[in-house]
Amino acid sequence: MNNALGWIGIFRLGLVQTALGAIVVLTTSTLNRVMVVELALPAMLPGVLVALHYAVQMLRPRLGHGSDLGGRRTPWIIGGMAVLAAGGTLAAVATVLMADHFVAGVALAVLAFALIGVGVGAAGTSLLVLLAKRVDDGRRAAAATIVWMMMILGFAVTAGITGKLLDPFSGERLLQVVAGTSVCAFMLALVAVRGVEGAGPAANTVSTGLPHSPLQRTPFRAALAQVWGESHARLFTLFVFVSMLAYSAQDLILEPFAGTVFGYSPGQSTQLSGLQHGGVFAGMLLVALTGTVFGGRQIGSLRLWIIGGCIASACALSGLTAAGFSGQGWPLRETVFLLGVSNGAFAVAAIASMMRLAGQGGAGREGVRMGLWGAAQAIAFALGGFAGTVAVDLTRALIAEPGVAYALVFAGEALLFIVSASMAMRISGLQPATVAARAPAAPLPLMPRAEGEA
């Protein structure tokens, strides 16, 4: 492959994911907790806001197609990161404003989270397209693993450091921490992506061979219809949606749960989120070190990690269910870390399958495929996060004990993971020659835990 990225180039693109994750983890975790605990607002409010930023990402297929037409990904990545940094800072301003001017704060938050969604969609989709088109086939699984793990590293490091900086908590300190993180993240992405792509459109034409081929000139609706007509792409999209619905439902309620039931401070609950993302990082390392991710012949082992990760995630969520009933005597940190490890093992094995599938069905449509799967993930995350917060509000309205209310929601999420594992088992029953092309989907490296988010 001409103009293929080497390991240094892959690592630099991973730094973009690190920067993206640093901003996203503050907006979806820390600000969510501040609204619910410090401002005593309904959990539904941050649920709606985060659902909005996912809903905006339904534009991902169009953004991916747009980057194909333009022939260059770098402007989309830089522009997306700039919009994301601005949206993250505005979200912090809106959260502080809600304390004294609720309506104005909510209105500003709607704008901020819409900008976050556009920024994540533009930067994340273009980054994945660049990887898909510029990385040799033999390195795609390794590249996906590296980039995803670097995003998780951004989650974990940011949550750990900012968790300490936020204590003692104040609105002014929140603004300083989020704005400073956003500026630093944008500068890191700007430096990381500089010169990686190359000087001209030809740098992006590894798959098609021509910068303006008929495939690239195809209108968006026709291109999307072509991709949707591929049976493996439809199957992959369905699995992305179902598995991400299970994966995302606890994102917006874990920190409020820690604050309400276990009495954690904002800094402590943010560090708990960092511990969870650290567990995801450890789970990915575990799978990588066994050799199953990079051994292209070991498709069966990848399926076992996907299925096992779903089942282990269900067990960890069952532990959180028990924590809701038991209260402060339960080992919460250990349970959350186990949940992270389980999620990470599932994610990295599925990412390896995703990168194999991205280039199938014909060249020139990598951007649309990535966008389609990213949109499926975004819709699942929007529904999952919102459903989780609504379920908490409803159960707390019916049940006086908050721990029990949270426990019932965690139990429902565990059931979703069991359903996902069952679905993965059915997919793994395909013939070996077909499985490589129809491997189950993964959380794209796009959103927190999101997020995730290229």
Image (tube, grey):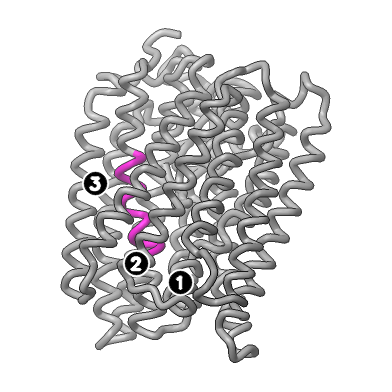
Q: Nearer the viewer, mark 3 or mark 1?
A: 1
The Cα–Cα distance between marks 2 and 3, rounded to whole angstroms, is 23 Å
The residue at the far front in this view is 329
Q: Is residue 11 left or right of residue 186?
A: right
* SS at mark 1 in the image: helix
- Residue 219 visible, this angle: no
* SS at mark 3 in the image: helix
Q: Quadrant of the N terminus?
A: top left
Amino acid beneath label 1:
Ala
Closer to the chain start, of discs 2 and 3, is 3
Considering the whole magenta stretch, tell me its main secondary structure: helix
Q: Tag on residue 277? A: none
**Depth order, front residue of 351/125:** 351
Q: Quadrant of residue 239?
A: top right
- Identify the magenta region: 17-30
* Crowdedness near tag 1: few (<14), some (14–19) or many (≥20) residues, C-alpha within 10 Å: many
Circle 3/circle 1 CB separation < 8 Å: no
Q: Tag on residue 258? A: 1
Q: Quadrant of residue 126?
A: top left
